[in-house]
Image: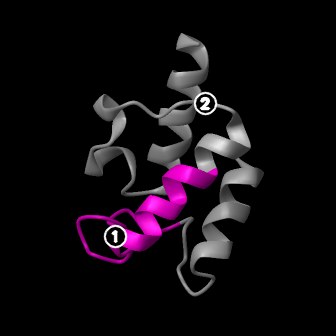
Amino acid sequence: MDELMEILEEIDPDIDYEKETRLIDGKVLDSFSIVSLVSQISETFDIEIGPQYLIPANFNSAAAMWKMIQEIQDEE
């Protein structure tokens, strides 16, 4: 989870990722940030985030992203 938090802090250090639960739905992150986030997560965790995972619910919070990462790692 620490690596994920580092990625998020690099994208926007002003967001409280531990508390924010509407990163996508609340338009806290813009489309460029999301593309960058997906790329960095894929590279850092050596996973492929397939289209079935590219839904707002998986990116609305750090906890949701971490859960998604773990699910993908379990599948691979």
Q: Mark 2 points at which residue?
A: 47
Residues shaded magenta: 19-40
The furthest residue to the bottom: 14
**CB-based contact (under 8 Å), mark 1 and mark 2:** no
Q: Which SS class for mark 2?
A: loop
Q: How crowded is mark 2: few (under 14 residues within 10 Å), some or many (20 or more)?
A: some
- Is residue 66 part of the magenta span, yes or no? no
Residue holding disc 1: 31
Amino acid at the residue labelled 2: Ile
**Residue nearest the viewer, comparing 21 with 55:** 55
Pointer 1 or 2: first along the chain:
1
Question: What percent of the width, then of the height, locates residue 38?
Answer: 50, 51
The quadrant where residue 53 appears: top left
> Left or right: where does residue 4 sit relative to residue 21?
right
**At x 53% / y 30%, what residue is drawn?**
48
Asked if the magenta segment contains residue 30, the reply would be yes
Q: In this view, does 75 lie above or below 22?
A: above
Image point 39% across, 30% down: which residue? 50
Q: What residue type is labelled 1?
A: Ser
Residue 72 place in picture, x, y as percent: 52, 24
- 62 or 30, which is in the foreground? 30
User: Residue 55: x and y, percent?
Assistant: 27, 44
Residue visible at 69% across and 33% down?
Answer: 46
Where residue 31 appears, x then y in whole percent?
A: 34, 70
| Residue plotted at (67% across, 62% down) | 7
